[in-house]
Image (tube, rainbow, N blue to C red):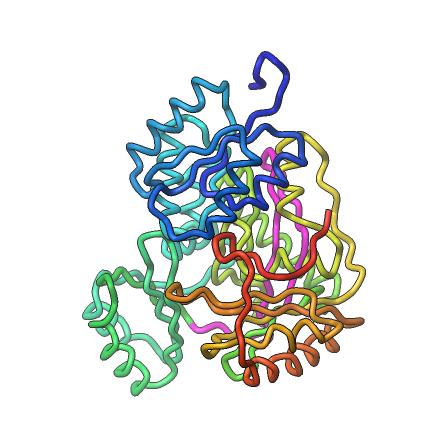
Amino acid sequence: MSPSDGTRRLLLVQPCHESVRKAVAAGFHVWSVRDRDTDDDPLCLAEAERLSQRLLLTDTREPAGLAALLRDAARSAGLSLTLYLGERPGRSAALAAVDAAGLSLTSARSVHRITDPTAMRRLLNESGRSVVRARHARTVTEVLELAEHWPLPLVVKHTGADGGAGVTPIRTPAELTAWTARRPADPAVGPYLLEEFLTGPVFAVHTLTADSMHHVLAITAHQDDGGTVTEVYPAPLDSRERAELRAVATALLDLADYRFGVTCTRMVLTPHGARVVAAEDGLRGAGPDLLRIGAGYDPELWLFRALAGEPVPRPVPQRAAAATEVPLPAGIGTADLASVPYVRYFRTPRPGTGQPGRVAVEAGSPDEAGRRITAVRALWDRAERADGGCGTCSRGRGISAG
C-alpha cells in the first residue's frame, strides 16, 4: 500500500547509517528505529539520524513496547513497509513486534523455521527434502542417553533463544566427555539437537527473495584449514552440483514460506546429495563482501531496490574473492593490510562482543584467492596497532558496489 502522496516510505529497525543511505538511494523516505541504551558508534547514529526522516529510540528487545512504537509510527507517517536489519541478539523479539504491528514482509514464524536448527530440521525431514538423521534433547542428560545408541561421529547443536546454535562435532567418547564438562558454563541449559555427522565439501547459497521469488545471487565454498574457514567466491562447481545446491536452498525457503529478504543456506554436498546444515537470514557473514568484490554487486542495495519494485539482476562473477574471520590479539596492523594491493576489505574485532576481525581479498581465480588469504593471515600476527571501521554496523574499511 503506497502513501497517498506517492512517496515510498520505509521503517527500518536497527539499521546502520549505510543501510539508511542505500534505502534512500533506492528511492525511500526512511524512518529509523534504534536502541535507546547502546554503546554504538555515535557517528553512525548521527549519520543515520541525518539521513532519516525521523530517528526513533526505544528498547528493541521489548516486543510490546516496540510493537506499540511501530504501530504509532506507521499510523502517523503512513508507513506500511518494515525491515529488521539488526544482529541475531534481539531478533526474535523485534520480528515478533513487527508481526504484532502488522508490518511484516516475512513473518517471524518463517524466519524461525529456517534459522532455528530444530525447526529447520523438522521442516526438511517432514517434507522428505535434504533428510538428515536428528533427535531433539532438552537436557545434557538426554543428550548422553541418546548418544549411547548413536554411532560416532555425531554433531550436537545447542540452540539459542534467537535461533543461533553452538555446533560441536563429537568424534570420540573423550570428546563427548569434554563437551559434557563444559556445559555448566553455558548461559542457558538446552535445548539440543543431535544430528548425524555429514562428510563432504561445504557450500553456501546466498539468496535474495522478493515477492516469494528466490533469486540465487552466489554460491560460495567453505574451505576448512585446521579450524580456520575461508569462504571463496565463486565456488568451483559443475552445472549439476550448482543446480542441486540451488534447488535445495530454494526448496527450504518455499517450505518456510519465506517471502522477502536475504538469506544464506549452508550445505554439505554428501555422496547422497546436498544436505542443509544451517541457514541464516539477513546480511551477515562474508557473503555480501564477496559479492561486492567479485561481482561489483551490493546485495543490500538490491534488497531495497527489489522492495521498490525493480527486477533483481543476477550477479556475474568478474573476479574471484575470498574472506576469512580471524580472532585477533590486542592490536591490528591496518597499515600493513592497506599496503597489500589485493586486500579489498578488512574489519577489526569489536571488543567485548566476540566478533572477530575479517579480511577479504580479490584474485584471478578461486585457488589464487585461497592462497592470498593464507598470505594475508600471516600479517595479523605481526600487527602492532589497531584502527577499525564502524563497529556498530559491522562495516570495515573497504569497497562499495552498486
Left or right, residue 153 beside residue 19:
left
Query: Is residue 61 depicted above or below 293 in this figure?
Result: above
Residue visible at 57% across and 47% down?
262
Q: Which residues are magenta?
A: 197-223
Residue visible at 43% across and 18% down?
75
Left or right, residue 138 beside residue 92:
left
Query: Is residue 184 depicted above or below 30 in this figure?
Result: below
Quarter of the image where one finds residue 200: bottom right
Quarter of the image where one finds residue 192: bottom left
Quick check: is 68 in the magenta stretch?
no
**Magenta segment main secondary structure:** strand
Residue visible at 34% across and 67% down?
194
Q: Nearer the viewer, residue 367 or 358?
A: 358
Q: Nearer the viewer, residue 131 or 33?
A: 33
Quick check: is 222 in the magenta stretch?
yes
How far across and how far down the image is residue 167, in percent?
A: 39, 69
**Farthest top residue in view:** 4
Query: Is residue 4 depicted above or below 241 in this figure?
Result: above
Q: Nearer the viewer, residue 201 or 34?
A: 34
Q: Nearer the viewer, residue 317 or 73?
A: 73
Quarter of the image where one finds residue 159: bottom left
How far across and how far down the image is residue 93, in percent?
A: 34, 42
How far across and how far down the image is residue 322, in percent?
A: 66, 69
